[in-house]
Amino acid sequence: MLPTRTTGGLAAPIVVAATALALAGWGPEGRARNVILLIGDGMGDSEITIARNYHVGAAGRLAMDTLKFTGAYTTFALQEARPTLPDYVTDSAASGTAWATGSKTSNGRISTLAGSSGVAPLPTILELAQHAGFRTGNVTTAELTDATPAVLNSHINDRTCQGPENMASCSAYKKDLGGPGSIAEQTVDHHVDLLLGGGRKRFDQTITGGPHVGYTVVHSAKLQGYHVVTDKFGLAAAGADRRLLGLFNAGNMSLEWTGARAALFPGSGPQTCTEGQRKLLTKEPSLADMTEAALRLLKSEDGPGFFLQVEGGSIDKQDHAQNPCQQIGETIAFDDAIRVALEFARRHPQTLIVVTADHAHSSQIVPVVSAVETTPRPGLLSTLITHDGAPMSVNYGTRAHLQSQDHTGAQVRIAAEGPQASSVAGLTDQTDLFRTMGRALGLW
């Protein structure tokens, strides 16, 4: 049965054209063996343009610019108190729920219905793929319990309930009260084949109920057959014979670049960014390393294929923090992971690749600050010297100095290549991506 798009109290059936009969076969508009979904958290068009200008110049192209089909999709959430009405600025939990489940929800919820009480899970694309026999993977530079990875393999009413010790807002989900547990516990209990990212501090917390009461979540993972690695060397040596849990940092993974934070008028800079911080200072893998390892471990020549999500999680976090160099560095690291995925797809053409964001963000390219300007501009500014040798001024203006900048409500880019890729062309909604991926995998 085909799923319906749920928007609060209204459910609109999907209209399927007669040409859908052709979807049963392999090919550009047919089945995919593999689906790779790459999410740049907070990577709106402005963030892409800032990174492109700085790294390869205004006339250059990033890997994400080369996919064959490009469109845009809407990102609005629902109001929790009135779930038939839109909330025009989404967070990562509601937006991720949209593509993971095909249903809108309210900000803060992880794959559960807006306005619901008790445990109200919405089935996810990863769960459906898993039940159909596909291998599954979830990769991020954020904590594995952060919103974007969490939407695939957990269901909870509040995104902050990341570990057993963080359950104050999620009492119905506590294991000692008969619930499925925190995001970390559910992530392990879902038996995803491959989990790579940060967030070790959540998995080091102690389980309060169920068969593994008294154990840490990471100990529970080992009891459930996971091989646990904590650095790039362990990841490189891992085999495909066991489930893999990679926890490479206590919190979010280390940043790639560094530079001066945006400041009040006239701003910071002119500056060039310092690259290579993670590689020099840590034993953590890059996002490209994790993507390459995931593809190596999940691929099968004769099995049904896999579903893999890869998130560049700290583009958003550095946008919040008004750090243009760090934001650009995370965008370029994400683009490197896209390049790895594209190379895989060109060797395995029955692979659908989708590159998109969960929401837009606050950074904007503005006219360069002049040396003779005397009237202060609003917001926080930084001027960078780009690949072209030209200055580029970036402004953050959704919050006051030293406050966390806000998401914005604009539509964002979605691009794709492979079977069903043309479905992203034009203007769609995040919920449509759920159906596109499901069709590609033959789930309906």
Image: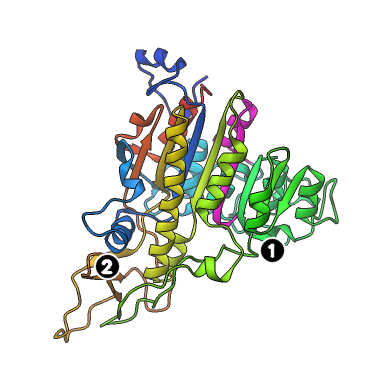
Question: How far from the left and from the top, in percent, is residue 344?
Answer: 47, 37
Can residue 60 be seen here? The reply is yes
* In this rendering, the label closer to the viewer, 2 or 1: 2
Q: CA distance from mark 2 to mark 1?
A: 38 Å
Q: Is residue 418 magenta?
A: no
Res. 324 image quadrant: bottom left
Looking at the image, residue 397 sits to the left or right of residue 85; the answer is: left
Q: Amino acid at mark 1?
A: Lys
* Residue 416 spot, x, y in % from top left: 37, 37
Q: Who comes first in sequence, dot 2 or dot 1?
A: 1
Q: Which residues are magenta?
A: 120-143
Residue pictured at 60% horizontal, 23% vertical: 302
Give the image location of residue 167, x and y in percent: 69, 58
Residue at x 65% of width, y 59% of height: 231
User: Does residue 163 lie above or below 96 as drawn?
Assistant: below
Q: Which residue is mark 2?
A: 386
Amino acid type assigned to the residue bearing label 2 in the image: Thr
Q: Which residue is the site of mark 1?
A: 201
